[in-house]
Image (cartoon, rainbow, N blue to C red):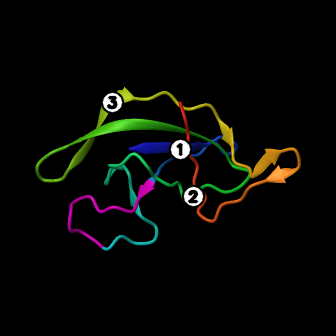
Amino acid sequence: MRTVTNERTGVVTDLVNRIPPKPGQGPITNEGVSSALSPIRRCIWTDHSVEATNSISYRVTAMSGDAGGHYSLDANSVSDWTEPLLVSGDAGGGLAAFFNRGTIILRS
């Protein structure tokens, strides 16, 4: 499960996933499914909820699943929060970059 904090508002939310909890389920609504119910099971993901000027930080919690496709949090594997990041297209020197998908890639 991936969690995001909006540093300006203090709101903490679970990121949504666009993959069904079990293979073959679907379709998923445009709002997605909470990553607490359908964990993100890939290395690349996109946070579609981010808007320019948001200040955000993320953390990751491992989840374990059973044969029935039910997931539970592994409370012993919660990562630390990332440093807050201001979302901006400003590249410095009078340059700005904008993307049509709002993808943010964090490096640790």
Q: Are marks 2 and 1 in contact (CB under 8 Å)?
A: yes
Amino acid identity at mark 1:
Val
Q: Are marks 3 and 1 in contact (CB under 8 Å)?
A: no
Q: CA distance from mark 2 to mark 1?
A: 10 Å
Amino acid identity at mark 2:
Ser
The quarter of the picture where the N terminus appears is top left
How many numbered discs sit on the rendered protein? Answer: 3
Q: Which residue is denoted by mark 3 in the rendering?
A: 75
Q: What secondary structure is marked by label 2?
A: loop
Q: Classify mark 3: residues with Cα within 10 Å, few (<14), some (14-19) or many (20+).
A: few
Q: Which residue is denoted by mark 1 in the rendering?
A: 4
Q: Earlier in the sequence, mark 3 or mark 2?
A: 2
Amino acid identity at mark 3:
Ala
x, y percent for residue 64? 23, 40
Q: Which mark is residue 49?
A: 2
Determine if the magenta segment contains residue 23: yes
- Left-right relation of 15 to 5: left
- Above or below, 81 against 106 in this view is above
Q: Residue at x 57, y 58 (%)?
A: 49
Q: Residue at x 20, y 68 (%)?
A: 24
